[in-house]
Image: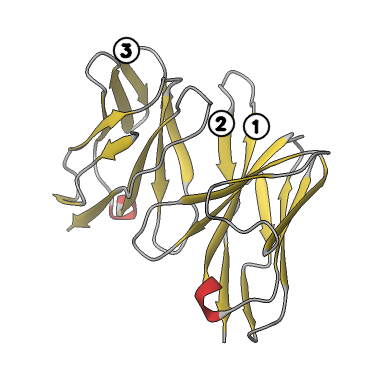
Amino acid sequence: GAVVSQHPSRVICKSGTSVKIECRSLDFQATTMFWYRQFPKKSLMLMATSNEGSKATYEQGVEKDKFLINHASLTLSTLTVTSAHPEDSSFYICSAKILLAGEVDTQYFGPGTRLTVL
Amino acid sequence: GQNIDQPTEMTATEGAIVQINCTYQTSGFNGLFWYQQHAGEAPTFLSYNVLDGLEEKGRFSSFLSRSKGYSYLLLKELQMKDSASYLCAPMDSNYQLIWGAGTKLIIKP
């Protein structure tokens, strides 16, 4: 079954508003979560690494004041897209680094959130 | 720099076998992951290789040659539901996954 949930799955908002996306690891503690965005037919682009209890590490070119990440607990990380614009429309996917029995630390992905900014 | 090379698209027939190749260059190496991604969905974990050789998991097998910077994913007894993109993702010295654009696999009846 799924080990990572993400909410909402789809969101449509007006330009200038803020949108919060939640990523939860189910039944597992994830000290590290990742946020990606993906454009159609393109590869995953890592936006930031979120560590529980500390500030997120953003990739080069990603505006930390625009994409606010909070990792308040071992099972929840949130991404807030502030003052969204149409160019922020994308597929946002979170993943959690989880060690399952007998396996290596592996990233398990949430189902993704499709954001459309009008 | 870091680089992943996979074919953009492949076509195979239902019931057949297909091999998706991946060559990579990374700063350090801590294993290689294969993920499956259906259109409009997030990736799902398929396999992990860190030592040379073949890892078999049901209909899917993954091979790694570290000296050649090469891996492949082998899919047997193809089913229509296997139509998806397959992402090869090596992990670099910082334990960060490096993502390519993936291989779109089209299965025909």
Whether residue B88 appears in this view of the structure is: yes
Would residue B93 be found to the left or right of residue A30 on screen? Answer: left
Give residue B52's mark. Answer: 3
Q: Nearer the viewer, residue A69 or A40?
A: A69
Image position of A76 (left or right of B89): right
Q: Are marks 1 and 3 in contact (CB under 8 Å)?
A: no
Tell me which amino acid carries mark 3: Asp
- Identify the residue at image location x=35%, y=20%: B55
Chain letter of mark 3 equals B
Instruction: Give the SS element for disc 3.
Output: loop
Q: Residues within 10 Å of mark 3 (few under 14, many from 20)?
A: some
- Type of the residue with mark 2: Thr
Q: Quadrant of the C terminus of chain A?
A: bottom right
Residue A106's disc is 2
Q: Residue at x 30, y 16 (%)?
A: B66
Residue behind mark 1: A98
Quadrant location, the N terminus of chain A: top right
Kindly indicate the quadrant of the structure image that contains residue B35. top left
Reply above or below: B30 against A35.
Answer: above
Q: Are marks 1 and 2 on the same chain?
A: yes
Placement of B36 over or under A10, stated as above or below: above
Distance CA(mark 1)–CA(mark 3)? 24 Å
First in sequence, mark 1 or 2: give its number: 1
Residue contact at pointers 1 and 2, CB within 8 angstroms: yes
Residue A104 in the image: state x and y as whole percent: 56, 22
Asked which secondary structure carries label 1, the reply is strand
In the rendering, at what x and y percent does residue B93 appear?
48, 22
